[in-house]
Amino acid sequence: MRAVRDSLPANLPDKRAHCLASAGIAQRCSVVEAYVAGAGKELSDLFTGGDAEWADWRADRVGVACAKLSQQIEAVSMCCKQHGY
């Protein structure tokens, strides 16, 4: 999961990063792990003074859905973009 996070370009908008990271985790690990990572991130934010947002969780779910459509990063990126991420 860290490898996916670290592979993302710097300075991505937050929701786009969520979408792409969740897609990458779903592809390289599993869908379950992508959901757990997204939920874990938001729970961590909630208890550590971070910025927990329902919108982040929605972007994570879109990323997982996009990952199911294609293994190609360009297609996944376009899918996230089409959903506003």
Image (spheres, rainbow, N blue to C red):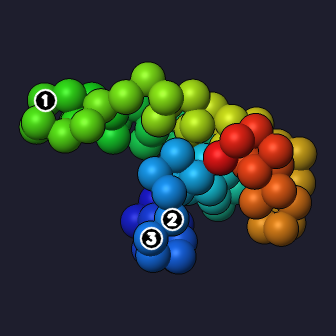
Between discs 1 and 3, the one toward the N terminus = 3
The residue at which mark 1 appears reads as 47
Q: In percent of the image, x 56 and y 38: which residue is there?
A: 60
Q: Amino acid at mark 3?
A: Asn
x then y, percent, for residue 1: 46, 59
Q: Is residue 25 visible?
A: no
Indicate the quadrant where residue 62 lies.
top right
Marks 2 and 3 sit apart, C-alpha to C-alpha, by 4 Å
Q: SS for tag 3?
A: loop
Between discs 1 and 2, the one toward the N terminus = 2
Q: Amino acid at mark 2?
A: Leu
In the picture as drawn, the residue positioned furthest to the left comes out as 48
Which residue is more in the foreground, 75 or 32? 75
Q: Is residue 27 above or below residue 31?
A: below
Q: Is residue 20 above or below residue 37?
A: below
Which residue is more in the foreground, 39 or 57? 57
Q: Is residue 47 above or below residue 74?
A: above
Q: SS for tag 1?
A: helix
Q: Residues within 10 Å of mark 3 (few under 14, many from 20)?
A: few
Q: Which mark is residue 11?
A: 3
Q: In percent of the image, x 10 and y 37: which residue is there?
A: 48
Q: Amino acid at mark 1?
A: Phe
Mark 1 vs mark 2, foreground winner is 2
Which residue is more in the foreground, 39 or 32? 39
Marks 1 and 3 sit apart, C-alpha to C-alpha, by 25 Å
The residue at which mark 2 appears reads as 12
x then y, percent, for residue 82: 82, 45
Labelled pair 2, 3 in contact (Cβ < 8 Å): yes
